[in-house]
Amino acid sequence: MTRPAPLFTPVLIVGCVVIMVSFAVRASFGVFQIPIAEEFGWLRSEFSLAIAIQNLAWGIGQPIFGAIAEKIGDRKAIIIGALIYAAGLVFSAWATTPFEMQAYEWLVGFGIAGTGFGVVLAVVGRASSDENRSMSLAIVTAAGSAGQIFGAPTAEWLLTFLSWQSVFLVFAGVVLALIATLPLMRAPEAASKAELEESMGAILKKAFKDPSYTLIFLGFFSCGYQLAFVTAHFPAFVTEMCGPILPGGALYSIGITSTSALGAVAISLIGAANVGGTLLAGWLGNRYSKKYLLAAIYAGRTIAAAAFILVPITPVTVIVFSIVMGSLWLATVPLTSGLVAHLYGLRYMGTLYGIVFFSHQLGSFLGVWLGGRMYDIYGDYTLVWWIGVGIGAFSAIVHLPIREHPRTVLAAAR
C-alpha cells in the first residue's frame, strides 16, 4: 500500500501566506472611502472609480500573470506582482487628486493579480494530489478570507493614530515582505504528457469553442459584482444607513460603539464566516457536481441580499447578513477553479482561470463604480443593490447547462 499524499505541503502553506497578505490589504480599501473623501472633498464616485479601476486592472492582469508564471516560473511572477503592488501603494499614498489615485490603482490592481488567485491557485493545484486538489484550493481560498478578517479592522485601527497615507506605506512594506517566503514555493510539473505537448494556443482555442467555458465566464461576473460592491461600499453603507448602536448593548460592551466600527467589523465577519464556507465548498466539490454547488451558492447569495435590503437595517441584521453572505463569499473560487482544471487540465490552468477571472473583475469594476455613481445621484445604494440581486439570480441559472466532462472527452467527441 502506498502512503496517501500529504494535504499540507510547503507550497500550500506559502500560498496561504501570500494570498492572506494580498487579500488583507485589498479588503481594507473600503475603510478609506470616507477619510479620503473628507480630506480632499472628493465625490464618493471618485474614490469608488479608483477602486473600480483597481479591480479592472486585477482582472486584466490575472491571465497575463498566469501566462508569465507558466513561461518563467510561479515565484518570479509573484515577485514581480509584489514589487508592482508595493509601488502602487507607495504612489497612492502621495496622490492628491482623483486622477492620480485612479492612475496609481492600475499598479495596485496588477500587483494583486501577481500575488492573487490566478497564480497561487495554479501552483497549488499542480503541487496537490488528485484526491487533495479540491480541498487544497479551498484552503488557499479560505486564507484569502482570513486576510479579510484582519485587513479592514487593522486599517481602521491604524487610522486612529496614523494618516491614511502612512497606512498605505505600512501595507506596502508588508507586501514586500512576502518575497522572503517564496524560496519554499517549489511545485512539480503535474501535467500529463499530452498536456505538456499541447500548446497554449491550442488549449485556448479549444476552451473558447466550448459553450461550457463561456457559461463559466458569464457566471463568474456576478460574483465579482457582489463581492467588490460589498468590500468597497459596505463599511460606508453601514456607517450611514444602519440604526444606532445603543449603550448597554452587547456590541457596545465589547467596544463596537459606532456604526463606522461596525462597518469594518462586518467585513471581518464576512471573512471569518467564509473560512468555514469555503472549506465546506472544497470538501463538497470532491463529492458532488461543481456546477450544481455553484448554482446553489449564487441562489443563496441572491436570497440573502434581497432579504437584507427589504428589512430595516439594524446592527443585528448587519451581523446576520455578514455571516450568511460570508459563508457563501469565496466558496465559488475553489469550485470554479477546480471546474476549469477538471475540464481542461492543469498545464494552463493559470491562464484559463485568469481569463474566467477577468469576467469576475469586470463585475467588480461595475459593482464598485456603479455603487459610487448611484450614491452620488440618489444618495443611497438601493438601486445598485437590487442590480446585484438580479445578476446573482442570472448566475445561478447560467451554471445549470454546463457539461462537466474533461476536455479530453470533448476532444475525442469531435
Image (cartoon, rainbow, N blue to C red):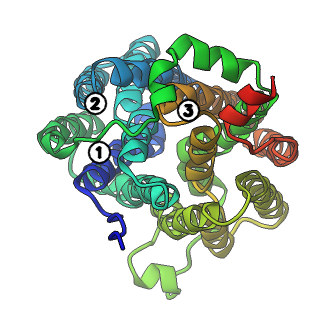
In whole angstroms, how far apart are the C-alphas of marks 3 and 1? 18 Å
Where the N terminus falls, by quadrant? bottom left
Bin the neighbour count of mark 2 within 10 Å (Cα to Cα): few under 14, some 14-19, many 20 and up: many
Percent from the top left, x then y, of residue 278? 54, 62
* Residue behind mark 1: 18
The amino acid marked with disc number 1 is: Val
- The residue at 50%/57% (across/down) is 267
* Residue behind mark 2: 78
Percent from the top left, x then y, of residue 355? 58, 24
Q: How many marks?
A: 3
- Secondary structure under badge 1? helix
Bin the neighbour count of mark 3 within 10 Å (Cα to Cα): few under 14, some 14-19, many 20 and up: many
Where the C terminus falls, by quadrant? top right
**Foreground label between 2 and 3:** 3
Mark 3 or mark 1, earlier in chain:
1
Q: Depth check: 57 or 278 in front?
A: 278
Query: Where 240 falls versus 348 (above or below)?
Result: below
User: For this view, does 263 lie left or right of residue 191?
Assistant: right
The reply to whether callout 1 and callout 2 are in contact (CB within 8 Å) is: yes
Q: Depth check: 371 or 276 in front?
A: 276
In whole angstroms, how far apart are the C-alphas of marks 1 and 2? 9 Å
- Within the image, what quadrant is residue 83 found in? top left
Mark 1 or mark 2, earlier in chain:
1
The amino acid marked with disc number 2 is: Ile
* Residue behind mark 3: 353
Is residue 136 in view?
A: yes
- Secondary structure under badge 3? helix
Is residue 42 in view?
A: no
